[in-house]
Image (cartoon, helix red, strand yellow):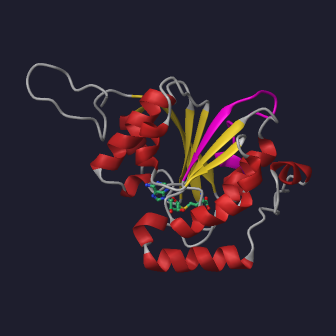
Amino acid sequence: MPTTQSVHRRPPGRRGSGTTFSHRSLFLRKWLRDREGIASITPSSSWMCDELTRHIRPDRPQRILELGAGTGVVTRRILARMHPDSTLIIVEVDPDFAAMLERTYADDAPRVRVLAQGFETVGDLLPDGTSFDVVVSGMPTPNFPPRLLASLRRLMARHATDAWLSQLTEIPVVFLGLYRRMFREVEFRFVPLNMPPGGVYHCRGVRAGGPGARRRRGPRRAGLAP
Ligand SMILES: C[S@@+](CC[C@H](N)C(=O)[O-])C[C@H]1O[C@@H](n2cnc3c(N)ncnc32)[C@H](O)[C@@H]1O
């Protein structure tokens, strides 16, 4: 069973994402069963992993949250880049992907923890005052209903106030408006060599009153959901 140490000994090169044939076929089978929830036919490429981990700093400890890890291709890149004293919480809702991640990182607690559940219930489990420095998301966020967008806003506002959210997309630029309405700072970086070509939205600072914000009647302005 690989440990964090062994992952660190062989950082993946640009072509070495560690994605195997069985990862690809599991991913494809999952996508055939749930196209909206998986939202991709194959794990992210090495180029996409590079861009998604732009805000992971090898030179200083960070608290890192990964949402929607799938087969763990981005997880491996995060572990290869992160400082030895950084911590990583991995969240994955699909039970088969989550079981795979739990087996892989069973020996790495408390530095690496896997939560086999939807991200929307994670905020309730975290002690008050828990705060992340970076959030990396492979989740199909634009497919989410308002309830889940509200959960993402709440999670970021409560536990990742100053953090970057690096959000995967496989449909370049189209959702720029959505993320600009949700966050004060948004930068889109194109990843043309991914298959299909995609990119990453790097977002920071949840806006009051954007998508997923709770609407109030009367003179009070809509604020962040509690
Ligand atoms: C496009 S895949 C990305 C997988 C991986 N990060 C990658 O880049 O290859 C989307 C992942 O988000 C997960 N996901 C979807 N909804 C989720 C939710 N509410 N909470 C946590 N994970 C979720 C899916 O199960 C799937 O593994």
In this picture, residue 171 sits left or right of residue 100: left
Residue 54 horizontal/vertical position (percent)? 69, 40
Total numbered circles: 0
- In the image, residue 181 above or below residue 41: above
Q: Is residue 141 magenta?
A: no
Where does the image place residue 9, in percent across and percent down from the top left? 91, 51
195 vs 95, left or right, is right
Q: Quadrant of the N terminus?
A: bottom right
Q: At 74% from the left edge and 68% from the top edge, which residue is drawn?
A: 19
Front residue of this view, candidates 219 and 180: 219
Q: Quadrant of residue 164?
A: top right
The one of 164 and 199 positioned closer to us in this rendering: 164
Q: Is residue 194 visible?
A: no
The structure residue drawn at horizontal position 72% and vertical position 79%, both measured from the top left corner, is: 21
Q: Residue at x 41, y 41 (%)?
A: 152
**x and y percent of residue 65 in the render?**
59, 41
| Image quadrant where one finds the C terminus | top left
Residue furthest toward the top?
Answer: 219
Judge by depth and name the residue closer to the eye, 191 or 46. 46
- Residue most toward the right? 9
Q: Which segment did they paint magenta? A: 50-67
Q: Which of the pair 95/17 is nearer the observer?
A: 95
Image-quadrant location for residue 192 = bottom right
**x, y percent for residue 16:** 82, 63
Residue 8 visible, this angle: yes
Q: Classify residue 121 as left or right of residue 74.
A: left
Q: Is residue 59 above or below residue 148?
A: above
